[in-house]
Amino acid sequence: MKKILKAAVSFLAVGLALTGCGNQEAGSNSDSASGTENKAEENKSGEQTVYTAVLLPNDGGELGKENEAIIEEMNVALEPLNAKVDYQVADDYSVVSEAILSGTGQISIGSGATYVKARMENEKVIPILTYAPDGNLEKAGYTSYIGTNKSHAKDFEGLSDKEKLQKLKGQSFSFVSATSTSGRVVPTTTLWETFGPEGSGEVKEKAKIFEATDKDGGIFSQVQFAGSHPASVELIANDRVYAGAYCCDYAQKAGKENDIEIVYQQQVPGDPIWINSENMQQEHIDAIIKHFTELTPENAKSDVLFAPEGQKGGEGSGYYLNNNDRYIAVKADYYDILEKMFKDEM
C-alpha cells in the first residue's frame, strides 16, 4: 500500500509540473521559502500567478461541477490581481495531503482530517474558510454515523450508546478511507474511547482499531476500507459488514436509510477550504476570503454554488450549498478537536 501511495504521489507531482505548477508562470513552489518573493516579481513583470487546487473527484471520477463552481469563484476574486486557480484531480486523500505539503498544489477543499494531517506536519498549512447555515459557525458541520443493517437492530434494543459500541466487538466493520474525517478518524476516536485505556482497556494502540483484526490485537473480526461514503453505505445496507462508518445523508441519497439502523452519531466540524500559506501571496489569500465571505445566491457568478430557495444542496444535488449557507473565515483552532483525535496516530 505504501508503494502504491508513493507512486500515486509521484505521478501527481509529475502531472502538476507538466500542467503549470512547475513552470515560471505558476511560481517556484519547489522553493517555498522564496515562493512569495518569486510570485511578487512575476506580478511586477506582468506574468500571471497560477495556483493549483488538488481535489478529490466525484463518484464518476471527475471534479464535479460543484467544485468547479468554487474554483470559478476563486478566479473571480483573483482576476484583479493577475492570478488564477487551476486544478488537478487526485484519487486519494493521502495524495491530496502530500501534494499540498510538497508544494505541487497550494489549495484544497474539504476533508477536515486530510487538512489536519497536513497541518500536523507543517503549521503553514491553514484553513481559511468553511460554511454554515446563515453564516453561524455554531451550526457548521455535519454528522458522522456508525450504522448496522436493520436485520441487527434487535441486537441494540434498550442499550446505552456505550453498550451499543461494545456490541460491535468481534464483528466486521467498514471504514471509508484511512484519512476520511467522518469515515475513519471520528469513528476510530469514538471506538478508542470505548475500547482503549480510558475505556475497557482491550485495545492498547489506537491504530489497532482500523489496522488490525481481533486476532492481532484489534476489536473487529474483519476491517474493510470501502473507499467512499456511498460504498460504505452499500456494504452496511447489503449486510456485507456487520457495521460501518459514513456521514451526512449518503444513506438517504442511495435510498438505503430504511435498511440501516443508526448505532452512534457525532457532529463533525465543517469541511474547510485550506491552503499551504508558504506558497501563496497574502493578498491573494485575503482576496479569496473577502470574496467568499461576501457571497450570496444573488451575487455568485456560478449558478450551481447555491441551491435555489426551497431546494436542498450538497453532493448529488447539482449544487454545493444550501440556499441559506454562507462562508465564514476560520482559523486553525476551529479544528482543534480533530487535531486531538489525530494526535495519538502521528
Image (spheres, rainbow, N blue to C red):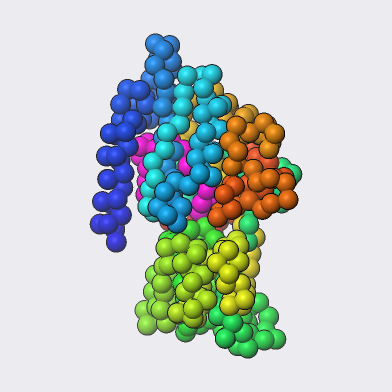
In the picture, measured across the screen, residue 108 lies left or right of residue 132, that is: left
Residue drawn at x 50%, y 44% as measured from the top left: 65
Q: Nearer the viewer, residue 317 or 125?
A: 317
Question: Which one is in front, 220 or 273?
Answer: 273
Image position, residue 203 (x, y; %)? 47, 76
Whether 303 is among the magenta residues is no
**Nearest to the observer: residue 164 or residue 68:** 68
Q: Is residue 230 visible?
A: yes
Can the viewer see residue 332?
Answer: no
- Quadrant placement of the C terminus: bottom left
Percent position (x, y) of residue 121? 43, 46
Q: Is residue 110 above or below residue 341?
A: above
User: Horizontal placement of 317 versus 170: left or right?
Assistant: right
In the displayed structure, would residue 219 be above or below residue 48? below
**Residue at (51, 75) in percent of width and height:** 236
Residue at left offset 69%, top offset 51%? 311
Residue at the spot 70% in from the left edge and 34% down from the top edge: 298
Residue found farthest to the top: 45
Q: x%, y% of residue 8? A: 29, 50
Magenta-highlighted residues: 94-113
Q: Is residue 331 above or below residue 7?
A: above
Q: Is residue 158 above or below residue 321?
A: below
Q: From the image, which quarter does the N terminus lie in? A: bottom left
Q: How many marks are shown on the rendered structure?
A: 0
User: Can you give x and y, in whole percent of width and height, for residue 266 in the image?
Assistant: 64, 64
